Amino acid sequence: MKKIVQFYIDGFKEMTLGRTLWVIILIKFFILFFVLKLFFFPNYLKKNFNTDKERSANVIENFTKSK
Amino acid sequence: MNEIVDLSMLDWSRGQFALTAFYHWLFVPLTLGITFILAIMETIYYKTGDPEWKKITRFWMKVFGINFAIGVATGIILEFQFGTNWSYYSWFVGDIFGAPLAIEGIMAFFMESTFIAVMFFGWDKVSKRFHLVSTWLTAIGANLSALWILVANAWMQNPVGMQFNPDTARNEMVNFWDVFLSPMAINKFLHTISSGFVLAGIFIIGISAWFLLKKREVPFAKKSILVAAIFGFISSLFLVTTGDGSARLVAQNQPMKLAAMEGLYQGKNGAGLVAFGIFSPTHTDPANDQLHEFLFKIEIPNALSYMIHLDANAFVPGVKDLLNGNEKEGMLTAADKISRGKMAIETLRNYKNALTEGRKEEALQMRDKFMSKDFQANYFKYFGYGFIKNSNELIPGIQLVFYSFHMMVILGSWFLIFFILSIYLIVNDDITKRRLFLKIAILTVPLVYLAQMAGWTVAEMGRQPWVVQDLLPTVAAVSNINAGAVMVTFWLFALIFTLLLIAEIKIMTKQIKIGPNEGGH
């Protein structure tokens, strides 16, 4: 286990171009998960309804409305 | 349904999905293909012990690393949109999509992250054999992780192995293997990954051609071209075969898409295959102004019938047969399908009302009726048609689909010729002197990306108006959210993806200019 951890530590330490790429990955993850997902992409049905029963009812209501 | 959906929001949601899917797909196919080319190159190094092959492998591994790092997680955004913009769709397909996407997530995380780390960090630290195994497993893992989302996509094109539950409004998987091993899923997976292999082959030949034009790294470039061209040639043959299979499956399950791909308005026995055609911008079919007539076309007689049915005189339906029906061929009219879809929706509504109002016995009877084999086969099968107001809504954008399809096929044919020429020039000739070919090789790189986008345009625009074939149109799948919010995120994505693309191109071109002799991982 120690060897595996050391393998990763050495790998990260020896990175050159990889460091730049990791910075890009981390910035991207931050924007995706802490900005976009949190503020712009709530789950519509989870946000507006508390239970699966209510969600099902809403979906059926929408599917069968004005027919 | 149409009255209560804000159509501008629908358009923005569709536009946003298309934008993110296209950008995401700029990164994916190179990963799918280049990992296998890397594995082949490293295998040659393992077998021969020639350090030149190690240098070659490490250089292309660096290129792969850049593409992987920039592209990783761009697909997550599509899943965000499922929950927000397409919540009714997500709910409707939830159980079918849940399993494949969960497997994809776990597989991608464990296989790719573990073996990619060994691939990049493990040179001279783990045994040559273990390193090679890790490279192969990275390639297999990357491609298998694409499998699950493609299985999900194939299910949308041909929904099988499920049962709609009228209590939850969800489709429930009743047979995993029917979903996983449906011919549409297998063919889609093989066609998509082989297109990625072709792209990677052309990408490597294009970059290597640049080195040869600059008179740099000649042995490196020639060896890279040799491997990429042979790999690309074999993949191209596979691509043609799976493309043929794909057309046959489209004919069976999505005949309107096939009619759009071929610009076939009136079905016929012995239908010809349009090799090339241009639509008139003004002249339309007198019976339907959505159907533009051909200004010019080159048609191979009977070829479409033969391609689809292996019978040169077989009947292939056109747009009009699919709208107006064809008694002789046993085809329902669109109006009949719409009426059956409305019946399915009405039965669902009556069942819901009976339940809500406490009419338990009546509700039970309605549920039994809804779930009966006869009702499922003759009414629920057309559930989505119940949302259609006008049968012309069933026609996809014919010109877009037709031109995209023909562009894909023409470019695909060129790629096959290109690989043959590459092999010939590298084996029998001095490719370094063929400067025109080297320039064409560089120009072919953007063309292979264009072909990829054209292929997805055919697949996704060709199945409009359906998000789930015959069961759910896009208009019923979209959430009741504000169009303004979708517009904001559309432009945010456009900005983020453009920045990522600029970063990819800048970092990659810098590393390519540095060449294979320097630079770390």
Image (cartoon, grey):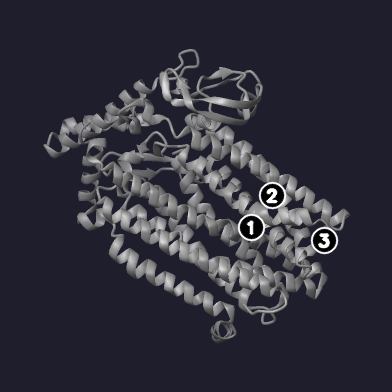
Instruction: Assign the N terminus of chain A to one quadrant of the image.
Output: bottom right
Q: Residue at x 69, y 47 (%)?
A: B415
* Element at label 2: helix
**Mark 3 packing: few (<14 Cα in 10 Å), some, or many (20+)?**
some
Marks 2 and 1, the one that precedes in the sequence: 1
Q: Is residue B126 left or right of residue B375?
A: right
Q: Residue most toward the right?
A: B428
The x and y percentages for residue B189 are 56, 48
Instruction: Report which residue position mark 1 lands on.
Output: B33
* Element at label 3: helix
Q: Residue most toward the front?
A: B282
Q: Is residue B1 visible?
A: no
Asked if B140 appears above or below A30 in the picture, the reply is: above
Q: Is residue B389 left or right of residue B206?
A: left
Instruction: Report which residue position mark 2 lands on.
Output: B235
Q: Which mark is residue B432?
A: 3
Same subunit under labels 1 and 3? yes
Q: Residue at x 53, y 70 (%)?
A: B113
Q: Between residues B371 and B236, which one lies in front from this camera angle?
A: B236
What's the amino acid at mark 2?
A: Ser
The nearer-to-camera label among 1 and 3 is 3
Instruction: Assign the C terminus of chain A to one quadrant of the image.
Output: top left
Assess whether mark 1 and mark 2 are in contact (beta carbons under 8 angstroms).
yes
Query: Which chain hosts label 3?
Result: B
